[in-house]
Image (spheres, helix red, strand yellow):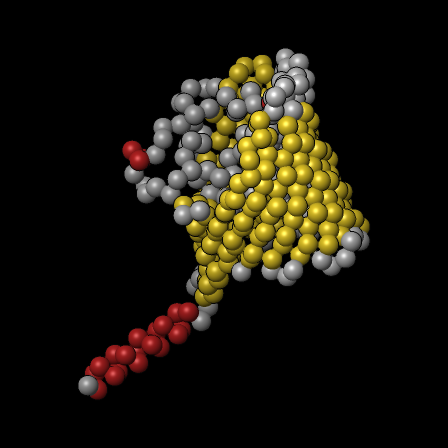
Amino acid sequence: MKKLLITSALAGSLLVSGSAFAEMKVKGYVETTLGSGETPATSAVTNQGTTIGYETGVTFSGTKDLDNGMSMTTQATLEDASLIDQAMAFTTGATTIFIGDDYHGLDDKQTVPAVANMVEDGNKGLGIKYNNNAATIHGNNGVGIMNKSDMGTVAVMYVPKVGEQNANDSNPAAQKKTGSGLALGFQGSLGVEGLGVNLFRTQKDTDSLDASEITMTGFGAKYTYGSLSVGAQRTTVDDADLSEAFVAGTESEYTSYGATYAVNDALSLGVQYAETSLTGAASDEEVLSYTVGYNLGGQVISVQFTDVENKGTTTGVDGEAVELRIKSSF
């Protein structure tokens, strides 16, 4: 009995000392949408009817100080029952080395302000082609390094297989045999209060092992002054169509402008305009979105109206959608 008590006490002591430098956090959200959209067409537009949808996510993250003076961070997210965004990072001073996916949104940062969803997410079945990061690799499994300063964060990330996003084990046979990718960029304020700047460049092979390479370049800026935020962003993808398939000599360009205004601590208004162009297309896709949001503290209710003209750069293919969105965070 005495031996059991001693063993239990020792185990408890180790547990306490081992967790003294560790911190585990859990955060999540439940999002419900009620919306009605149209199937864009040149005539006789078909209404898709009203639909109720859900999105859920839970993120687990932990930090721990290591014996060598570095700190370690781990994270993983369950989103709609799928494991994503698993990553591990080691930090010393202002420098962090990370391995995983979506630890740093290197080529996924959006500088256009929004009250709720961006136009590419809140279009309720319109199927628009605008995409601020059409050739991103931020969600792929890779390794990278970043350095933070008062000016902002500089980062680089290498992905050995751009077609692999799943949480597979280390068995190469379980992963798609695809080309590699490299992204580098900067995100920060440049030392100016209220300013946000985003610059990135991504090069990646197509999903086969050939030398067909797609290049994406993006830049944007946002400025906040009091209750008003304004921003713009442009992304250019070389040698790819709007479906991100390799097409030599083809260029797609995505441009967006937007503004939000906080009427008070709870009520906000937002507008965003987005344009998509493609080499040889007869028209540019144009999207206009208006949003009203109300923050109840931990729960945001928003109504978003979206209008698209020339969807997918096809002349006269137009449609509209409206969405009520309720997002609860914990």
Between 230 and 107, the one lying in front of the other is 230
Residue 196 against residue 172 in the figure, above or below: below
Residue in view at x 65 percent, y 49 percent: 302
Residue 278 against residue 146 in the figure, above or below: above
How many numbered discs?
Answer: 0
Between 156 and 126, the one lying in front of the other is 126
Q: Is residue 133 visible?
A: no
Residue 54: where, in percent of width, then height?
50, 47
Residue 310 against residue 142 in the figure, above or below: above
Between 57 and 289, the one lying in front of the other is 289
Residue 65: where, in percent of width, then height?
47, 63
Q: Is residue 41 visible?
A: yes
Residue in view at x 45 percent, y 57 percent: 60
* Picture quadrant of residue 304: top right
Q: Classify the position of the N terminus by image quarter.
A: bottom left
* Farthest residue, direction bottom: 2
Residue in view at x 42 percent, y 69 percent: 19
Residue 238: where, in percent of width, then height?
59, 21
Left or right of residue 329, residue 85 in this image: left
Left or right of residue 94, residue 68 in this image: left
Residue in view at x 41 percent, y 45 percent: 82
Residue 231: where, in percent of width, then height?
73, 40
Left or right of residue 62, residue 104 in this image: right
